[in-house]
Image (cartoon, rainbow, N blue to C red):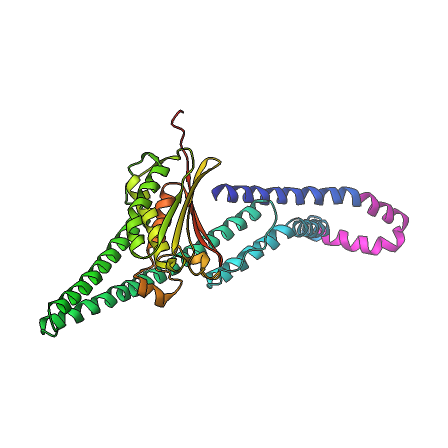
């Protein structure tokens, strides 16, 4: 910023001396012309010249020449500084509008000189300020949404737990079978609360970068094969199946095995919840250039196009009422996205009436290197 003002000072000095030079040049050029006119029209101009000489004798110097020089100097200064003055005026007006709270305006100075650079820096500063205000607004909204969603998601199972425990305390059950039924419901609701708290804790730590990654070379094909085998029995009990289509080669990645396992567990669990109607979950893995690509596919109802861009946001639910039935808190996919991005990967989703697919891409490593 200091260099800008130094350059501006030098520009003013340059304008001053340039105006002086132009004034002197004008006098040098015009004087012979005026002398020639005087010589050709001496008698007609004599009274006027005598008046000038008389004034000069009174003041002791050529007043009229001084007036002409000053007027020429002012004229050239105005002409040469017109662009600079206009840019300064635009900057002042823009700053006044910005100071009144109108941060949407931009100072319209497009010159490539120091003032143009100054206006560009002011515009950039205001844009950063507006972005910071928007981030603050979104952070406040996210905080309020967090409180609202957590309160709702904790209150719903907590109300059920209190209700069933009250029935047990007041001995309002017919026999031991009904008692065990009440206890089991309270237990399942407690697990749901615990899962929500753990998910929220994990997501918060990931958001602040507080989860250390213990990266080691991992064969992604072997990891997913083990995971799908573990889910097979659980899916069989729900009248579903999981099919894994591995590639012929290994897919080696540098990753934290526990975190990657958690990410794909969440994806498969999500497919179980919302793809139950399709009765099948497919997991496909392949090498795509220098990346490992894994697709988790279910054949349940499609995700509406209007919801697809937001499904990885915290607490976002495609179907609010169905999420309550399936026990989803809206954190699973957000956690998956955080884990994948911590591993320098990417995740996105596609959905149609035929299938819904979650595609994960992770960078491969070369163990021979």
Nearer the observer, 89 or 189: 189
Q: Position of residue 218 (x, y in %)?
A: 33, 35
Q: Quadrant of residue 182?
A: bottom left
State the residue lying farthest toward the top. Answer: 368
Q: Is residue 219 visible?
A: yes
Q: Is residue 293 magenta?
A: no
Left or right of residue 156, residue 28 in this image = right
Nearer the observer, 327 or 242: 242
Nearer the observer, 215 or 220: 220
Q: Quadrant of residue 307?
A: bottom left
Task: Tell me: residue 118, above or below residue 246.
Answer: below
Taking the spot 85% from the left edge, 53% from the top edge, the residue there is: 46
Taking the spot 24% from the left edge, 64% from the top edge, the residue there is: 154
Q: Position of residue 108 (x, y in %)?
A: 59, 55
Q: Position of residue 298 (x, y in %)?
A: 41, 54
- The C terminus, quarter of image: top left
Nearer the observer, 114 or 77: 114
Q: Is residue 46 magenta?
A: yes
Task: Tell me: residue 246, above or below residue 87.
Answer: above
Left or right of residue 73, residue 152 in this image = left
Q: Position of residue 138 (x, y in %)?
A: 39, 59
- Magenta extent: 31-57
Task: Tell me: residue 28, above or below residue 355.
Answer: above
Task: Tell me: residue 28, above or below residue 279.
Answer: above
């Amino acid at each position: 910023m200091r260099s800008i003002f130094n350059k501006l000072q030098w520009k003013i000095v340059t304008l001053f001396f340039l105006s002086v030079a132009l004034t002197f040049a004008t006098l040098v050029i015009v004087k012979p012309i005026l002398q020639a006119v005087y010589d050709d029209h001496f008698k007609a101009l004599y009274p006027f010249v005598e008046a000038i000489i008389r004034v000069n004798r009174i003041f002791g110097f050529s007043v009229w020449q001084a007036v002409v020089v000053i007027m020429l100097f002012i004229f050239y200064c105005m002409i040469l500084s017109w662009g600079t003055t206009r840019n300064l005026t635009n900057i002042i007006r823009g700053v006044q509008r910005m100071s009144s709270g109108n941060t949407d305006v931009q100072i319209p100075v497009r010159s490539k000189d120091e003032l143009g650079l100054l206006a560009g820096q002011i515009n950039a500063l205001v844009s950063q300020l507006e972005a910071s205000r928007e981030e603050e607004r979104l952070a406040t909204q996210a905080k309020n949404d967090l409180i609202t969603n957590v309160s709702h998601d904790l209150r719903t199972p907590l109300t059920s737990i209190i209700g069933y425990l009250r029935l047990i305390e007041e001995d309002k059950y017919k026999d031991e079978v009904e008692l065990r039924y009440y206890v089991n419901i309270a237990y399942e609701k407690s697990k749901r609360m615990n899962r929500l708290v753990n998910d929220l804790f994990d997501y918060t730590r990931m958001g602040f970068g507080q989860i250390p990654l213990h990266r080691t070379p991992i064969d992604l094909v072997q990891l997913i094969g083990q995971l799908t085998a573990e889910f097979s029995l659980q899916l069989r009990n729900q009248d579903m199946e999981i099919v894994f289509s591995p590639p012929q080669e290994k897919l080696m990645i540098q990753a934290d095995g526990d975190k990657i396992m958690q990410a794909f567990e969440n994806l498969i669990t999500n497919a179980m919840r919302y793809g139950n109607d399709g009765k099948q979950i497919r997991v496909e893995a392949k090498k795509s250039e220098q990346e490992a690509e894994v697709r988790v596919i279910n054949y349940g109802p499609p995700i509406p196009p209007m919801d697809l861009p937001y499904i990885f946001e915290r607490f976002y639910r495609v179907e609010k009422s169905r999420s309550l039935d399936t026990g989803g808190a809206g954190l699973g996919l957000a956690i998956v996205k955080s884990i994948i991005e911590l591993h320098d990967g990417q995740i996105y989703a596609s959905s149609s009436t035929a299938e819904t697919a979650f595609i994960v891409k992770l960078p491969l490593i070369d163990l021979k290197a």
